[in-house]
Image: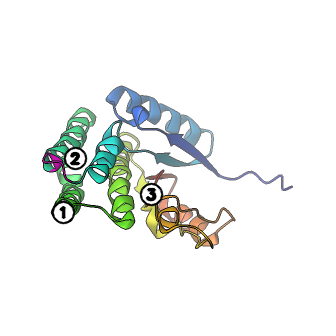
Amino acid sequence: MSEERSDWIVLKFGGTSVSTLENWQKIVSVVKKRRDEGFKVCLVHSALSGVSNILQSIVEHPGDHDLLQKVEQIKEKHIALGEDLGVPADELLADDFEEVEHIVKGVELIGEASYRVHARLLAMGELMATKLGNAFLQQELDEAQWLDARKYIKTIIRKNTTERSQIISAVSKTDFDQNVADALDQAGPIVVTQGFIG
């Protein structure tokens, strides 16, 4: 077993932990402490509290007449947190809001969501939340880089599994990956990325 210490430390936070200014101030304190101890920090976090549930309900009830209202709820949650954090959520997330709305309109029109649409829609919660978190860390610590996990983590094709399992419960390799290590090192001392991603 190697005695060599990694320069990186991974901090993982759930949805409740990233949904208020007070909690983000605590996160900034933890990141700063770890950085001051000589670590580079990879911050991994979930969608805002309640957002994954709303997205899941869209997939499970595609015939509901209030799907676009659910999209508005998601937008409002992000914009409200952005205002609390002092970051422009409406600008940062404009493309994401549009993508969620397009996906949901498609689900509404067809009356169902494929497994790929399901995974993509759920991933949007993580993508949006981490963009807000990254903007706040940049503002507070002058350095943070957002990474889209979909560019670096690849899933494994497993034999004898259902299509649903291949997409919704996909797994990835856990071996050391030099490309991921290089991407992290190039990104800088503080990286923000997603937890669940589809």
Q: Residue at x 62, y 71 (%)?
A: 160
Question: Residue tagged by mark 1?
Answer: 102
User: Could you tell me if residue 139 is visible in this image?
Assistant: no
- Label 3, label 1: how far apart the Cα atoms are: 19 Å
- Label 1, label 2: how far apart the Cα atoms are: 19 Å
Q: Is residue 66 magenta?
A: yes
Question: Residue tagged by mark 2?
Answer: 89
Type of secondary structure dominating the magenta stretch: loop
Residue 149 falls left or right of residue 3: left
- Label 2, label 3: how far apart the Cα atoms are: 21 Å
Residue 64 falls left or right of residue 189: left
Q: Earlier in the sequence, mark 2 or mark 3?
A: 2
Q: Which sits in the foreground, 41 or 93?
A: 93
Instruction: Please rate how many residues cluster around mark 3, counting C-alpha atoms within 10 Å: few if below 14, some from 14 to 19, many from 20.
Output: many
- Give the number of the mark in front: 1 or 2: 1
Q: Quadrant of the C terminus?
A: bottom left
Give the magenta part as a residue range.
63-67
Q: Residue at x 45, y 29 (%)?
A: 26
Residue 127 falls left or right of residue 167: left
Q: Looking at this rendering, what residue extends furthest in the top direction? A: 22
Q: Earlier in the sequence, mark 1 or mark 2?
A: 2
Instruction: Please rate how many residues cluster around mark 2, counting C-alpha atoms within 10 Å: few if below 14, some from 14 to 19, many from 20.
Output: many
- Give the number of the mark in front: 2 or 3: 3
Q: Which sits in the foreground, 25 or 106?
A: 106
Vertical arrangement, residue 29 with respect to residue 160, above or below:
above
The secondary element bearing badge 1 is classed as helix
Question: Residue tagged by mark 3?
Answer: 197
User: Could you tell me if residue 57 is visible in this image?
Assistant: yes
Q: Residue at x 33, y 30 (%)?
A: 20
| Residue 156 found in image quarter | bottom right
- Identify residue type, mark 3: Ile
- Identify residue type, mark 2: Ala
